[in-house]
Amino acid sequence: MNKSRGDMLKENFGAISWTLKKFFGFYPVLGPLAMLCVLFSAIVASLPAIFIQKVLAVIEKWVSSGDWAAARVELLPYIFTLIGLYAVSICSLTLETQLMAVMTQGFLDKMRREMFGGMQDLPIRYFDSHKTGDIMSFYTNDIDALRQLVSQSLPSLIRSVSIVLAVLFIMIYYSLWMTLVLLLGVVAMFFVTKTIGGGSAKYFLQQQKAVAAMEGFAQETMEGQKVVKVFCHEEQTQADFDKVNNELFDVSYRANAFASTLGPIIANIGNILYVGLALAGGVFILANVPNVSLSGMVFDITVLIPFLNMSRQFTGNVNQLSQQINSIVMAGAGAQRILSLINEKPEADDGYVTLVNVREKADGSLEETEEHTGHWAWRHPHSADGSVTYTPLRGDVRMVDVDFAYVEGKPVLNDVSVYAEPGQKVAFVGATGAGKTTITNLINRFYDIADGKIRYDGINVNKIKKADLRRSLGIVLQETNLFTGTVMDNIRYGRLDASDEDCIQAARLAGADDFIVRLPQGYQTELTNNGANLSQGQRQLIAIARAAVADPPVMILDEATSSIDTRTEAIVQKGMDRLMKGRTVFVIAHRLSTVMNSDVIMVLDHGRIIERGSHEKLIADKGTYYQLYTGAFELE
């Protein structure tokens, strides 16, 4: 449903208000101090008109009397007072700019931290449904819009409003009639600003979204550049990019056309108003129109000249206000997107059972310890009597009658039951989309089931804190992600307190040590761009070593050897066998040769387990697995 202009302006204003509330919340003392500096300098900027009127009155008296000595005595205090005010104003502006520089960068730093911290708590579902480039746009374009708001638009807004109000008061003090003439022009400025400024709001929001879409497309294309070139898809990719870029051009043009038109219109209204005021003032003087003012002065040339200067100052700052609409509306659009990110519902976690290090006491019971003993247990507090019990971490995983759908109404798993006893190797085979990876996603609670139960060592996984649940699971995914840093850093990612020797032993266990030591700097070789300087198989070996160093009781191997050639697979398989020894292991594989030695093999089809048993049993049953194994087709 399309939103009305009023709704969009309301949302835009609400997002700006939220931003300013956050800003002054971070800086409850420095923020108001900086704004007071802006206010003070603005007031000082509006005072020259008063001094000009006083000086003109003294000059007029001097011309009529010819007494320069008396005039000089009157002039000097005005001059020195004005110099003093300007000196203080310079100091105030200097302090304001320094404070704003510190606060602006501090504000952006805190906002990025809040955004990134909140993003760590979002469910996997969010990242599955948003492009990486779109997410990155939050930290670039949208956050830069907030920078412009707090560092430029906000001080300019306060300064211009202060000058407008101060000048308006001074003008009323000198002549009410002339002020009313001026306000007629202000009414015209107001309607122009409302019409044009309001029209730009929706386009600036669309512009922020279009920028995010363009960045997402560009990043996706850069990551898939090899595929683009292999299939000679350059021209079509260029055409697709042109389409996205043209959409950005269109909304950006419309947004900036509205905003850029406003300034010249307001400026020319100000010029017309200046001429009108000069004519009106001349008529008032020639016709001896009685002056109505707070000052009680007669309206003459000594009042008209500073009044005209004040009108320039007044309309100039109204124009300055209109110029800020561009940045303010854009900031509102960016703030709306950032606010939507921060308001995203975090991953639900109602678990209270935690994973702790334990050691066995003399009586055979377990006690919690801060030392890394290599023995783990589930710490289960009981709210009824305040007691705490410890269940040894064994790796017993059971799924009972589980149903699941990524999208409501489109089931992926139907009535799935899986039993994995400690130390068992359970393999899942089946066509792409059968639900193999989904099962492992449910075990580590990347997604929550719709119906059924999943128990880990007899504990419902919903009762286990997600961080502790995932700490007990080692996962090697089909898609390998290596981070910028050394090979050693990437292996240590599995357990941050692991020593160098622990990492090397894990690499040897995975069969990765042989190629790592031949790298230019061995384990200290820097990896960049997701390990682009390594082969796919080498990257996968490092990922396996990363899981090995974590030393978890349960391992999930999702196509862990899919990117490794047959010769390398034989080497890795030996390491994998050592890695899997004594652990509960879930294996997803297309190559049936990698699952033959599994204790239980489960064949999935359209979200259901249609066969289960050992390799020998399934071959004897001569069902789907038998057809796969004997060559009716091979899932590779």
Image: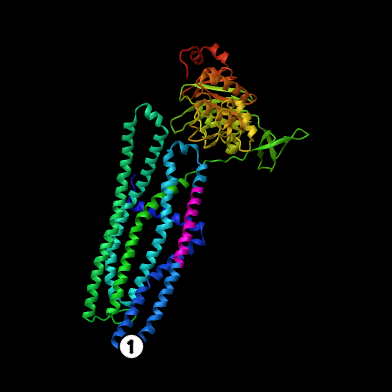
Q: Residue at x 48, y 35 (%)?
A: 529
Who is closer to the viewer here, 210 or 491?
A: 491
Residue 145 x/y as whole percent: 41, 51
Q: Nearer the viewer, residue 194 or 310?
A: 310
Q: Position of residue 539 (x, y in %)?
A: 52, 29
Q: Residues within 10 Å of mark 1 (few under 14, many from 20)?
A: few
Name the outermost residue toward the front.
Answer: 520
Q: Nearer the viewer, residue 56 or 470?
A: 56
Judged by its main secondary structure, the magenta piece is helix
Circle 1 is placed at which residue position?
67
In the visual, does 444 lie left or right of 605? right
Quadrant hosting residue 77: bottom left
Residue 109 is inside the magenta segment: yes
Left or right: 563, with 210 as reference point:
right
Q: Residue at x 31, y 32 (%)?
A: 235
Residue segment shown in magenta: 91-113
> Farthest right residue?
362
Residue 294 can be seen, yes or no? no
- Give the amino acid at mark 1: Asp
Is 218 part of what is drawn in magenta? no
**Colour scheme of this structure image?**
rainbow
Residue 272 rendering spot, x and y as whole percentages? 24, 66
Q: Quadrant of residue 391?
A: top right
* In this rendering, position of residue 567 left or right of residue 58: right
Task: Identify which residue is drawn at 60% across, 23% down.
Answer: 575
Q: Position of residue 406 (x, y in %)?
A: 46, 33
Residue 165 visible, this orientation: yes
